[in-house]
Image (cartoon, helix red, strand yellow):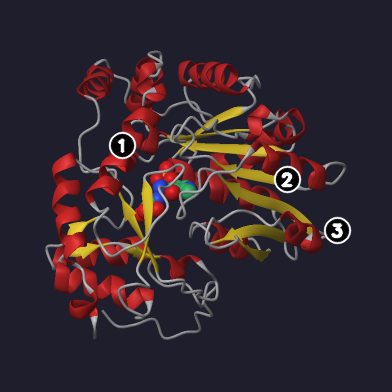
Amino acid sequence: MPQFNGLINSKLPSVGTTIFSVMSKMAAEHNAINLSQGFPDFSCSDELVRLVHENMKAGNNQYAPMPGILPLREQIAAMVGDLYGTHYHPDTEITITAGATQAIYTAISALVREGDEVVIFEPAYDCYSPAIEMSGGKPIYIQLKFPDYSIDWSAVKKVLNHRTRMIIINTPHNPSGSVLSANDMKELEKLTNKTDIIILSDEVYEHMSFDGQLHQSVARYKNLAERSFLVSSFGKTVHTTGWKMAYIAAPANLMAEFRKVHQYLVFSCNTPMQYALAEFLKNKDNYLELKHFYQAKRDKFVRLIHNSRFTYQPCSGTYFQLLKYDTICSEKDTDFAIRLTKEYGIASIPLSVFYHKPIDNKVLRFCFAKKDETLERAAEVICKISPEYAKP
Ligand code: PMP
Ligand code: GLN
């Protein structure tokens, strides 16, 4: 095919292919165990699949209403209300989206204008800054403290000004596995009180906080909830990342702006899956058990790799475990991740790619949303990684 001959003038000149696609492709090419991109290698519930099938057979195959089917929005209102104490009105304050990625992109497009500043914390999930830049906004990067990946609120205070339109928080946090505390939320409340700052709270791992820690949703705090978009993903909650189904909740005036964009970006989302989720989530165990399920996976994984040469702190949430390898070699994390994939047959994600200017703390992220047998095979490989072998 001949190439376009005119001027393209890329809107995102420094953006390439996401690390998740790069590492998953490399894992497949080298037949490596794929603990890189975050997705389960086990099935979702048979009951959920049956519900989707039944709804397809029952003829629920045409456009859903623009904000999503009402039974699912009602179910979300009930779940969020029960868990966090804020009642979102299903009619005006909850919208079903095609994954959290679309919810995040849409919220940013709807609210961020040319010249607006948006505070994001690094290492940051990779879809935030391209969305900000596409809206003409400027990402303002604050680095999380190493090695616990906590927020330095005095640094946040220093960057806030009249151009600050939005702060994006993410708890439990991808890629670090850290979680925000009640004290963090109080700090956020103090800094945003009496400002026009909107909070975009990425809570896709809302049901995956471990060791008895409460998930700190913005919906637990009235003063935060009234200026926030809360985003969650059914991909994580019911093990269906390939369905790209999520929800966003916000006060009616923010949601009205969101829907102005949503209706022209996707209009509405997959109908039979919405009916199936509405039914499936009536059983509270289907989301409340998740933290126990993944905590057991985390515990198993760290137990299995305990005698490896990596060092770690067990993660506090998400399905990602960070492993530090400075005791093994001093190679760049991107090079080391590639070599582990090609030479050892295990794929991970290097942390430096989540910074706008790479910071290499010699840390790799491993996804433990895997069958026990996969974790066992992975741990066997991880335990073999040694300084001798690791030398370039
Ligand atoms: N935010 C975070 C922190 C994520 O880890 C992910 C992806 N897993 C998303 C957003 C996007 O979620 P979805 O797959 O529902 O688009
Ligand atoms: N959220 C997943 C991760 O962090 C990947 C999602 C994607 O591939 N876009 O690994």
Q: Quadrant of residue 343?
A: bottom left
The residue carrying mark 3 is 162
Front in this rendered view, residue 137 or 270 = 137
Residue 59 percent location from the top left of the image: 28, 18
Sequence order check: which comes first, mark 2 or mark 3?
3
Residue 339 percent location from the top left of the image: 23, 75
Q: CA distance from mark 2 to mark 3?
A: 12 Å
**Above or below 311: residue 101:** above
The residue carrying mark 1 is 240
Sequence order check: which comes first, mark 1 or mark 2?
2
Q: Quadrant of residue 22?
A: bottom left
The image quadrant where one finds the C terminus is bottom left
The amino acid pointed to by label 2 is Ile
**Above or below 283: residue 303:** below
Front in this rendered view, residue 249 or 183 = 183
Q: Residue furthest front?
A: 307
The amino acid pointed to by label 3 is His
Query: SS class of the residue under badge 3?
Result: loop
Q: Quadrant of residue 215?
A: top right
Q: CA distance from mark 1 to mark 3?
A: 40 Å
The amino acid pointed to by label 1 is Thr
Residue 184 percent location from the top left of the image: 68, 44
The residue carrying mark 2 is 198
Mark 1 Cα within 10 Å, few/some/many (few <14, many 20+)?
some
**Above or below 297: residue 110:** below
Query: SS class of the residue under badge 2?
Result: strand
Which residue is found at the position 37% from the left and 41% from the top?
A: 244
Which residue is found at the position 73% from the left and 45% from the top?
A: 198
